Amino acid sequence: RLSPIKSIRKYCLDCCVGSSKEVKLCIIPGCPLFPLRFGKGAKGVSPLRMIRKNCLGCGEGTAFDVKNCEIDDCLLYPYRLGKNPFTKRKGNISNLIPFARKNSVLSTQETPRTGIVEAVANEFLREQKA
């Protein structure tokens, strides 16, 4: 699995028939991936945002079409939603506090701790399944 920036580089190489010389000579500055075509970051340019923008320009150009894209062998496919699906993110626990207080897992004075947050999350998941 490639990082977003490496996926962009490989995508650009595929677009230019595998020639790094052609990537260097690319004459499509309107392409959202243009500033990232060398596989290096560019100041003020988010690779994930540029992939999303590129995907919106492909096909019908709607968010619905991007989300339901059927071209799963595309190098940019995993990143098409503008997020890295391979990064494990820790959720913002402050979102769980109101839920915990509402369900009496936390008192109004209590500060959440990791174990409490896990208990709240498990309770929440049980309710979602029911």
Image (cartoon, rainbow, N blue to C red):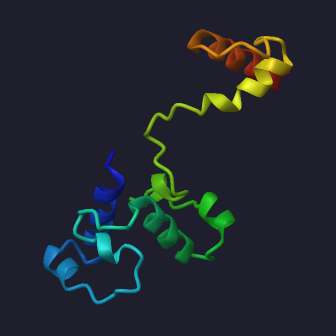
Closer to us: 33 or 112 = 112
- Residue 85: x %, y % from top left: 48, 44
Q: Give the answer, above or below, for where 14 lies relative to 107.
A: below
Tell me what residue is drawn at x 22 percent, y 78 percent: 23
Tally of marks: 0
Query: Residue 83 location, x and y as percent?
Result: 50, 51
Q: Residue furthest bottom?
A: 27
**In the figure, is residue 18 to the left or right of 7?**
left
The foreground one among 20 and 35 is 35
Residue 127, by quadrant, is top right
Image point (51%, 59%), residue name = 80
Q: Residue at x 60, y 9 (%)?
A: 115
Q: Is residue 68 visible?
A: no
Query: Which image quadrant: the C terminus?
Result: top right
User: Looking at the figure, which quarter contains the N terminus?
Assistant: top left
- Above or below, 101 against 92 in this view is above
x and y percentages locating residue 104 in the rendered image: 83, 12
The answer to whether residue 25 of the structure is visible from this angle is yes
Picture quadrant where residue 102 is located: top right
Does residue 17 lie above or below 2 as drawn?
below
Front-most of residues 13 and 70: 13
Look at 21% across and 71% down and name the residue there: 18
Q: Is residue 86 left or right of residue 18?
A: right
User: In the visual, does 28 lie left or right of 87?
Assistant: left
- Above or below 2: residue 60: below
Residue occupying the far left of the picture? 21
* Residue 29 position within the rendered picture, expressed as x and y whole percent measured from the top left: 34, 86
Residue 97 in which image quadrant: top right
